[in-house]
Amino acid sequence: MVRLPYTTALTTLFSYGLLFAFGQLRDLFRKLLDWFRSKDLKGYAPICLGLEDFYVRRLYLRIQDCFGRPIASAPDAWIDVVERYSNDNNKTLHRTSNSTKCLNLGSYNYLGFAAADEYCTPRVIESLKKYSPSTCSVRVDGGTTQLHAELEELVARFVGKPAAVLFGMGYVTNSAIIPCLIGKGGLLISDSLNHNSIVNGARGSGATVRVFQHNSPSHLEEVLREQIAEGQPRTHRPWKKIIVIVEGIYSMEGELCKLPEIIAVCKKYKAYTYLDEAHSIGAIGKSGRGVCELLGVDPADVDIMMGTFTKSFGSCGGYIAASKEIIQYLKYTCPAHLYATSMSPPAVQQVISAIKVILGEDGSNRGAQKLARIRENSNFFRSELQKMGFEVLGDNDSPVMPIMLYNPAKIPAFSRECLRQNVAVVTVAFPATPLLLARARICISAAHTREDMIKGLEVISKVGDLVGIKYFPTEPPKLAKEAHKKRESSIVAERFCGCDIIGV
Amino acid sequence: MAKLYVEAVPPADMNKNTEWFMYPGVWTTYILILFFSWLLVLSVLGCSPGMAWTIVNLFHFAITYHFFHWKKGTPFADDQGMYNTLTWWEQMDNGKQLTRNRKFLVVVPVVLYLIASHTTDYQHPMLFLNTLAVMVLVVAKLPNMHKVRIFGINAGN
């Protein structure tokens, strides 16, 4: 549920219409100018139809310098961004050898493990010397080292499931596992704002895919009832199995999934649940165990838990944690396990060390400090932004906070002006988000100090005034405290009221 | 000035090409664009209001026919060509007929026709052109014409 001023909706639609019209005009002139040029394809078909990449050519390339900026350092709280210039209005960009040090508000560095860490880095370098950067083999041949076995046990223990399996890439974990779990004759019900990897996996599985309204257990129940009653398309036979896929924290909204209610609905109709904790594992919950710990859900109630090591652990790769039987089955059938090179050993060691720090098994309490710091940082940043009048999405405690921009022209304005003032932000537009709802996504890290965040807030406030994105009225300081208390109590009330919908 | 806010529930439509039409403000923007283009035509050409409405109607016919009923597919490659044989009108609302959005889009050319023919006092040749425009547009939007290609026109990929 997003609230936007009505005039903003009108102007955003009008701007997109104008951009579309200009893009079409340019395409028309290009077709006319190229009318007499010989299109000698030597009998081959064209690689893409002219219409398919219209969005990329006419809208994305205009503001290409806001995306894909190369960096020249580790993605810590401060990051070196390489400067680029363009001679042909952003059609091609060239790197220079200069870089500017900017405040990093875009990396998924939730616990600060992205830069050198006093416990993790020496151990990673040691494992690099001992095991070398690559195992040069697939898991089933010669690619399972002691580290891989250790990490699988550690992940299973951390998450609270009997067993786990690792993969070298987070995206592949979703898109290669879902086809192994379900096939033709099965039903996948996924949240409407699920990540592209899940959508890809769902399409590749061959099962029927249905979508339910984002984070709405009542609509999920409606869809489940309708689909179970109708059965498979055309034959109306009963479904072979039903899997419901949700995410822990939705990366474009910053909000938590309504997990207890959704699990209750799935249990009522005997559907399996698949939880993608890419952004929530390690970042939320009292001991970092993710959205299950935060919302009080028993991990045994979720059938399959998936996560990635890229966000909170500062490494790369993904895992699936489930019962012993499922993991054994996946090890025999999943192509990502049978044919893909195994995770790089230093990356595995990084995750092992990071989990040990989080659990406190390295002998210090840095893990607990980091978790407390990220919670404080996120709540502070979010409440300050809301006080300034920005429209910020996401729940409290979530380290991801999108600031709504809406108008397509404000995307490059915000991004470039922030970069000029040495703050690096990530802006997201259509088609990763709905058309009207373009946003700048801020990711807070435990490595950010109070001074860093205050500087970030000053810059964002100044740029927000220039660009005009303070859609809500600013709160005067003395009313802010009461509003803050009211907001917190209303969120708690909402979480408890969710159970009323399904009569639990 | 009190700011008017609207609440939007993101619709559960997978097709990004048509999903934007379900947000609030689209109908108003459409009508405002038509009205402002009439003002623009009046100020640039300096013709009578009736002629201006006729010109707006004919341009509206050409543009909406081209983009709603001629162009097929989507402007991005993400969906792997799933909709490559469907025009925008056929993709709307996931193929469901007679939804609110569809009814609105049928009413707009008819209202434009009424305004254009009234302000030109039903004279020829404007009446003939306006009638032709509205008949083609309304027939193209009928539910019976879903996925129909007359004489195989526009059936190619």
Image (cartoon, rainbow, N blue to C red):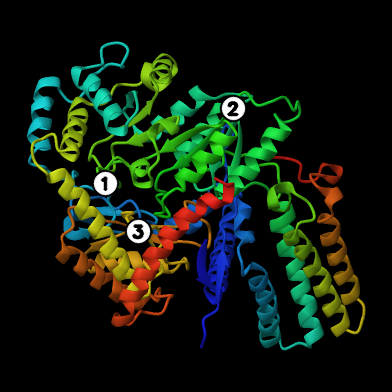
Q: CA distance from mark 1 to mark 2?
A: 39 Å
Q: Is residue A373 above or below residue B127?
A: above
Q: Is residue A325 left or right of residue B71?
A: left
Query: What percent of the width, then of the height, locates residue A99?
Result: 17, 57
Q: Chain of mark 2?
A: A
Badge number at residue A396? 3
Quadrant of res B39? bottom right
Residue A206, label in figure: 2
- Alpha carbon of mark 3 to alpha carbon of mark 2: how far? 38 Å
- Sequence-wise, the earlier of marks 3 and 2 is 2
In the picture of the structure, the residue carrying the numbered disc 1 is A286
State the residue in front, A478 or B117.
A478
A98 lies left or right of A265: left
Q: Is A47 or A61 nearer to us in this picture? A: A61
Name the residue nearer the viewer: A93 or B68.
B68
* Mark 3 to mark 1 CA distance (whole Å): 14 Å
Residue A362's image quarter? top left
Q: Are marks 3 and 2 in contact (CB under 8 Å)?
A: no
Q: Type of residue at label 3?
A: Asn
Mark 3 or 2, closer to the camera: 3
Point 51% across, 52% down: residue: A498
